[in-house]
Amino acid sequence: MGKSESGKTRKNPIRRYKRAQLVFPTHIVRRQLKAKMPNRRFQKEVEVLVTALVEHSVERLLLDAAAKVTKGAHIDSQHLHSAINDKNSEVYGVFPKNVPGVF
């Protein structure tokens, strides 16, 4: 807790992603949006919405990859690759196919 000039203690601000009960920080998404589109203005809710969409997509991808893991094994790149390319997966088609370095 910080002290103001009058000597009273004040509460530390709650980050936007914590208030929205997200795991991924929204300020990083906002920075990336501003870097990609510098002449655009964004409402504050946009960064929360985009962060929630990214977080949900990653969660679904990890759940699909975890379903392909045998007992006692770890999720590796092959599991992620098969989860991304599985036509029955919820994240099928989200990731581009012909980009070098992307699964």
Image: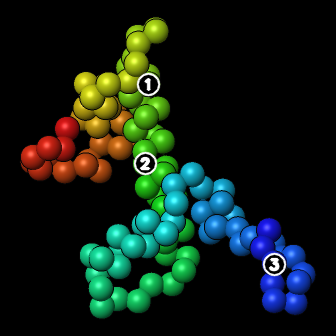
Q: Which residue is mark 2?
A: 57
Q: Secondary structure at mark 3?
A: strand
Residue 74 screen position, x and y as percent: 40, 19
Res 67 → quadrant: top left
Q: Which mark is residue 66?
A: 1
Vertical position of residue 94 compared to residue 77: above or below: below
Residue 95 screen position, x and y as percent: 25, 49
Which residue is most to the top? 71
Q: Which residue is mark 3?
A: 3
- Say whether residue 41 is left or right of residue 5: left
Res 16 → quadrant: bottom right
- Say whether residue 34 is left or right of residue 36: right
Foreground: 85 or 9?
9
Q: Residue at x 54, y 80 (%)?
A: 44
Residue 89 screen position, x and y as percent: 36, 36
| Residue 81 visible in image | yes
Vertical position of residue 70 compared to residue 26: above or below: above
Foreground: 103 or 11?
11
Q: How is the image coloured?
A: rainbow
Q: Residue at x 43, y 55 (%)?
A: 54
Q: Residue at x 64, y 67 (%)?
A: 15
Q: Nearer the viewer, mark 3 or mark 2?
A: 3
Amino acid type of disc 3?
A: Lys
